[in-house]
Image (tube, helix red, strand yellow):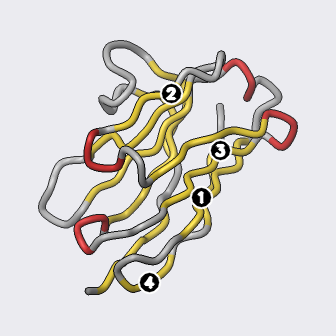
């Protein structure tokens, strides 16, 4: 069992920045595919970015050149640096671990955090 705890969400104005963190309760963190997802009210959960155990990264098109996913294996922590935020980035952001199958931007993960809210005002 892997527990994930997100933090770093908040309310910012358009153009602002936030950094999300996700701490994982496992010594196997360095072996795990990790990802960030988000879900806005009334919408499906959307893959934002993913990073595998080798450091390979993918982003959804809408956040490319604005968001950066990274991991610190020594601290069992996943990060999402979000710059030039837009109102359409408003959502609950979730950390996910242990990719099961398919595209790493699809929500096929075994473990999920509780989420952290990001609100961007215009």
Q: Which residue is mark 4?
A: 12
Label pair 1/4, CB-CB below 8 angstroms: no
Left or right of 122, for residue 11: right
Label 4 neighbour load within 10 Å: few <14, some 14-19, many 20+: some
Q: Residue sitting at 74 percent across and 24 percent down?
A: 30
Q: Nearer the viewer, residue 103 or 2?
A: 103
Q: Nearer the viewer, residue 50 or 13?
A: 13
Label pair 2/4, CB-CB below 8 angstroms: no
* First along the sequence among labels 1 and 3: 1
Mark 3 vs mark 4, CA separation in Å: 21 Å
Q: Secondary structure at mark 2?
A: strand
* First along the sequence among labels 3 and 4: 4
Mark 1 vs mark 2, CA separation in Å: 20 Å
Q: Secondary structure at mark 4?
A: strand
Q: Which residue is mark 2?
A: 57
Mark 3 vs mark 2, CA separation in Å: 13 Å
Label 3 neighbour load within 10 Å: few <14, some 14-19, many 20+: many
Any mark on residue 78, and which? 3
Q: How many marks?
A: 4
Residue 36 sits above or below residue 104 on the image: below
Q: Position of residue 120 (x, y in %)?
A: 34, 79
Any mark on residue 75, and which? none
Left or right of 82, for residue 78: right
* First along the sequence among labels 3 and 2: 2
Q: Which tag is nearer the camera, tag 1 or tag 4? A: 4
Q: Nearer the viewer, residue 97 or 73?
A: 73
Q: Which residue is mark 1?
A: 6
């Amino acid at each position: 069992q892997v527990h994930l705890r997100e933090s770093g969400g908040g309310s910012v104005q358009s153009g602002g920045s936030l950094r999300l963190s996700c701490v994982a309760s496992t010594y196997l963190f360095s072996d795990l595919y990790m990802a960030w997802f988000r879900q806005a009210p009334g919408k499906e959960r959307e893959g934002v970015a993913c990073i595998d155990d080798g450091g390979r990264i993918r982003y959804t098109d809408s956040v490319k050149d604005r968001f950066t996913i990274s991991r610190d294996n020594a601290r069992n922590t996943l990060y999402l640096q979000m710059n030039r935020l837009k109102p359409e980035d408003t959502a609950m952001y979730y950390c996910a671990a242990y990719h099961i199958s398919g595209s790493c931007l699809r929500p096929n993960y075994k473990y999920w955090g509780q989420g952290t809210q990001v609100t961007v005002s215009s």
